[in-house]
Image (cartoon, rainbow, N blue to C red):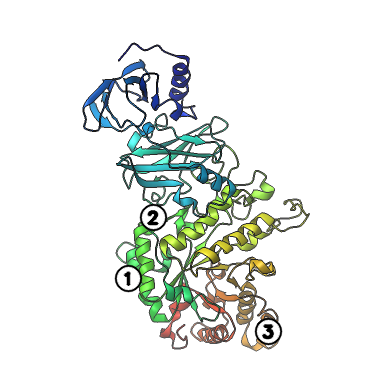
């Protein structure tokens, strides 16, 4: 190599890269044109020497070490920027043959940046996250993450000894996305994003678009690859129609049944072999899974998720979940997913203060904090956040074959004063209590499902008298297919809890629902909400001595079958099943 003069550009980038504050590494590292050919620059901390080699392993040029912190440079006369090369790197204890990630181009195109910034990327998970791809005949993983206010973002993992100084990512200022292709990273590798935030604080973040995650208490994301598209199961999708009678079995996979040998959770595969035949035998048409996106705290039952694209590792792998859903479809059982997009927890590895700003959440606690649950509320009015959430709805339906989504806590989303006293909330731009941005998000998501999901449905758990929840968006509604009838559930249980001698004075509790029965497309729920937090089982709510109070279930089941609505039952309800001699099958 010819003699090399240390330039101002070298001085600038050497200092920025070695201090971990460079937001544009691709403008310096990798291969670039020069007057007589190309110039290659690499940053390899701890390396003693480095050579440029061709794809056959033949030496092309030794590289000059221009800084003891690990910077090497070589000028190749007559070569062009499409020259394919590798690096032979000598370390104190080994010599390794590696690819240079900075010679590969981005997978994020100009249109992707525009669609994402506008909130019009229907399937953002096809671009963001960790994708197993091949570029220039080299296999690896394309990583990308949204962090518009970060000073620097790096991918860290076992493949680079969790060193954030190497593998700094490329920044796209039009969208705020950072990306990089890392050659030879394999499926199953753990990774995170090291974010130097706007305030100069280093944060280690899980991937918001991760397709798999470590088992708690570990919090790294796992390279898994985007699941393949699952063809819609027409029989189960047709059952979503308003004129089809269905009965839903609501179940928490972690407590339905345990392994008898060690009291541990059953895997997705074991649940497919045990739960699905049971549900089929009981006559249910659908299984509703309590949230299965990755979550840190077992006691939340999945309602405080940190990674909405990642099936929880408690029960196995994403492939295991796909197997479970396919087995349900094989038996003609539709699968409904409890979908939590109303809030997220404050765990540091998650979305909170992601790039040193309130990126996914509101900055003002009066808009962005749920004091009941110690969680944060999504900033639905931000295009990229809305895109992140609405894309997830399509992801579960298209990539796993989920047939419907039951959207949790809709009332907390659509009202700014939900569970807040005067002075604890901020009115909307018209002075009202409605969360207009959340309403727009729900309408947008439901329109996407209507147009793109081939019969997938959405069900709102909405506990107020908000009008038009299950009306089309064209008619001013929220666009859900169905609404949980929480009023019916509360009135019915209040009635059934009374001693039979007093019920004749409270028949209004059973008849009031008829006054609004046809205002929405309803699901009649007897759900987990009525037994958790010390409320007691449904059986214990009934008057009378043990055994005889089982008779109270007969009118409840009869009412469910007589009212014009879909039915949803908690898994504990069916434990009484035929053994008692009184409970009919679904």
User: What kind of element bears circle 3?
Assistant: helix
Q: Give x and y (percent) for residue 258.
A: 36, 66
Residue at x 50% of width, y 84% of height = 550
Q: Nearer the viewer, residue 457 or 112?
A: 112
User: What kind of element bears circle 1?
Assistant: helix
Mark 3–mark 1 CB contact (< 8 Å): no
The mark that comes first in sequence, 3 or 1, is 1
Residue 317 placement: quadrant: bottom left
Q: Is residue 234 above or below residue 431?
A: below
Q: Residues within 10 Å of mark 3 (few under 14, many from 20)?
A: few
Mark 1–mark 2 CB contact (< 8 Å): no
- Which disc number belongs to residue 273? 1
**Is residue 437 toward the left or the right of residue 113 in the image?**
right
Label 1 to label 2: alpha-carbon separation:
19 Å
- Which disc number belongs to residue 511? 3
Q: Is residue 211 above or below residue 166?
A: below
Residue at x 60% of width, y 42% of height = 358
Q: Give x and y (percent) for residue 43.
A: 37, 25
């Amino acid at each position: 190599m010819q003699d090399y003069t240390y330039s101002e550009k070298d001085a600038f980038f050497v200092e920025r890269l070695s201090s971990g504050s460079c937001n544009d590494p691709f403008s310096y590292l990798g291969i670039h044109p020069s007057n007589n050919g190309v110039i290659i620059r690499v940053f390899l901390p701890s390396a003693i020497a480095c050579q440029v080699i061709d794809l056959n392993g033949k030496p092309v040029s030794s590289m000059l070490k221009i800084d003891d912190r690990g910077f090497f440079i070589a000028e190749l006369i007559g070569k062009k920027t499409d020259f394919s090369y590798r690096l032979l790197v000598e370390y104190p204890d080994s010599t390794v043959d590696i690819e240079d990630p900075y010679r590969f181009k981005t997978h994020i195109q100009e249109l992707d940046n525009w669609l994402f910034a506008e909130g019009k990327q229907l399937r953002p998970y096809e671009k963001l996250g960790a994708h197993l791809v091949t570029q220039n005949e080299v296999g690896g993983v394309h990583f990308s993450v949204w962090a518009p206010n970060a000073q620097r973002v790096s991918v860290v993992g076992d493949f680079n000894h969790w060193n954030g100084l190497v593998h700094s990512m490329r920044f796209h200022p039009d969208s705020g996305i950072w990306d990089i292709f890392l050659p030879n990273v394999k499926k199953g590798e753990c990774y995170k994003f090291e974010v130097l935030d706007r305030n100069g604080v280093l944060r280690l973040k899980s991937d918001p678009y991760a397709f798999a995650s470590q088992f708690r208490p570990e919090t790294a994301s796992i390279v898994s690859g985007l699941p393949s598209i699952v063809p819609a199961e027409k029989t189960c999708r047709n059952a979503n129609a308003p004129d089809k009678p269905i009965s839903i079995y609501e179940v928490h996979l972690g407590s339905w049944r345990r392994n008898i040998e060690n009291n541990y959770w059953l895997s997705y595969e074991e649940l497919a072999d045990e739960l699905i035949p049971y549900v089929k035998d009981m006559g249910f048409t659908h299984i509703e899974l309590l949230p299965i996106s990755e979550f840190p705290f077992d006691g939340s039952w999945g309602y405080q998720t940190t990674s909405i694209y990642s099936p929880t590792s408690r029960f196995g792998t994403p492939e295991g979940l796909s197997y479970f859903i396919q087995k349900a479809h094989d038996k003609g059982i539709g699968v409904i997913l409890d979908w939590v997009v109303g809030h997220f927890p404050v765990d540091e590895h998650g979305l909170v203060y992601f790039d040193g700003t309130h990126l996914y959440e509101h900055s003002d606690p009066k808009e962005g904090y749920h004091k009941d649950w110690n969680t944060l509320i999504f900033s639905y009015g931000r295009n990229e956040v809305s895109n992140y959430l609405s894309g997830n709805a399509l992801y579960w339906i298209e990539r796993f074959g989920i047939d419907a989504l039951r959207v949790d806590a809709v009332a907390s989303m659509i009202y700014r004063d939900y569970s807040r006293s005067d002075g604890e909330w901020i009115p909307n731009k018209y002075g009202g209590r409605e969360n207009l941005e959340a309403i727009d998000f729900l309408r947008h998501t439901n329109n996407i499902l209507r147009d793109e999901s081939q019969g997938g449905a959405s069900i709102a758990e909405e506990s107020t008298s908000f009008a038009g929840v299950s009306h089309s968006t064209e008619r001013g509604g929220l666009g859900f297919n169905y609404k949980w009838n929480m009023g019916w559930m509360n009135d019915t249980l209040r009635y059934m809890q009374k001693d039979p001698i007093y019920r004749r004075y409270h028949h209004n509790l059973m008849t009031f629902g008829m006054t609004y029965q046809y205002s929405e497309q309803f699901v009649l729920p007897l759900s987990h909400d009525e037994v958790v937090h010390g409320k007691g089982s449904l059986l214990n709510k009934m008057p009378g001595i043990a055994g005889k109070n089982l008779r109270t279930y007969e009118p409840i089941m009869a009412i469910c079958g007589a009212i014009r609505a879909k039915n949803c039952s908690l898994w504990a309800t069916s434990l009484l099943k035929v053994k008692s001699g009184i409970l009919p099958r679904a």
